[in-house]
Amino acid sequence: MKKSQIIFSTFSPLMAVDTELVGSGAEAVATPRVYSLCRCGESGRKPLCDGTHAKKGFVGEREDSNKPALEYYRGGEITIVYDRYLCMGAGFCGELEAVFGTHDAPKYEPDAAPVEDIIATIRKCPSGALSYIVGNEPFRKYYGATRIVVEKDGPLHCQGEITLIDDQDSDLLLPDADHFTLCRCGGSKKKPVCDGSHETNGFKGG
């Protein structure tokens, strides 16, 4: 098991173990070896937990638990792999419209741009929804450092060798995934992962 962990239950905050925390201003945040991160969206000490979830009766159950199968889009030199469930709608893929289309009209055309441009675009995807295969080798590991990065008024970007452990036996992440995004606004229907709800529910998390 990976040394760094994020552990939580349906009713608890996120407990990070042996994981560096980087604030929304790119500053290192001093933390003990084990610390708790808010995921109800209402802590007065964001991104850290202050116990508000207990007062508010926060329940972190997923409303959308139907995780579809991975989608594979095969081209001549590269296969695009899409995990629809992990997508948080960050929109970086739309920068390569010839391949990925737009938010309103998505598509997956792996032969519509140079392979290096497709790889560069996929590597911008923070949620891990996009990955790729070249030859027979899948590529999902992009980060050398292990840390949690706070997005301003957005989710927690978990990068590197982090194990996610909960009380629902979740299998949301691929075993070799080295990046994913966790909800901290409390509004995601796919808890604990972010579904982009912070963009529409007015979340302000610093």
Image (cartoon, grey):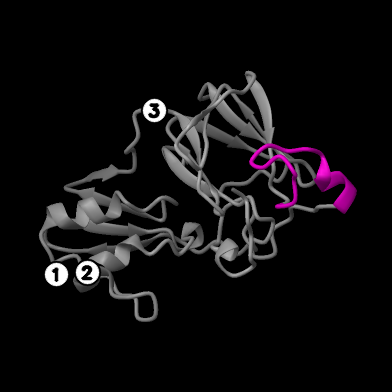
SS at mark 3?
Answer: loop
Residue 14 visible in the current orientation:
yes
Q: Are marks 2 and 1 in contact (CB under 8 Å)?
A: yes
- Residue 40 lies in the magenta-colored region: no
Residue 93 image point, x, y percent? 31, 63
Residue that badge 2 annotates? 99
* Between discs 3 and 2, the one toward the N terminus: 2
Element class at badge 2: helix
Q: Nearer the viewer, residue 138 or 161?
A: 161
Q: Which of 104 and 136 is in front in this view?
A: 104
Q: What residue type is labelled 1?
A: Ala
Q: Name the residue under label 1.
A: 112
Left or right of 116 on screen, residue 84: right
Tell me how far mark 3 sits from mark 2, CA to CA.
Answer: 29 Å
Instruction: Look at label 2 and name its amino acid.
Output: Val
Question: Is residue 44 in the magenta section?
Answer: yes
Instruction: Give neighbour class at mark 3: few <14, some 14-19, many 20+ (Cα, 10 Å).
Output: few
Crowd class of label 1 (few under 14; some 14 to 19; many from 20; radius 10 Å): some
The residue labelled by disc 3 is 145
Could you tell me which residue is drawn at 33 percent across and 61 percent down? 92
Q: Give the range drawn in magenta.
A: 41-56
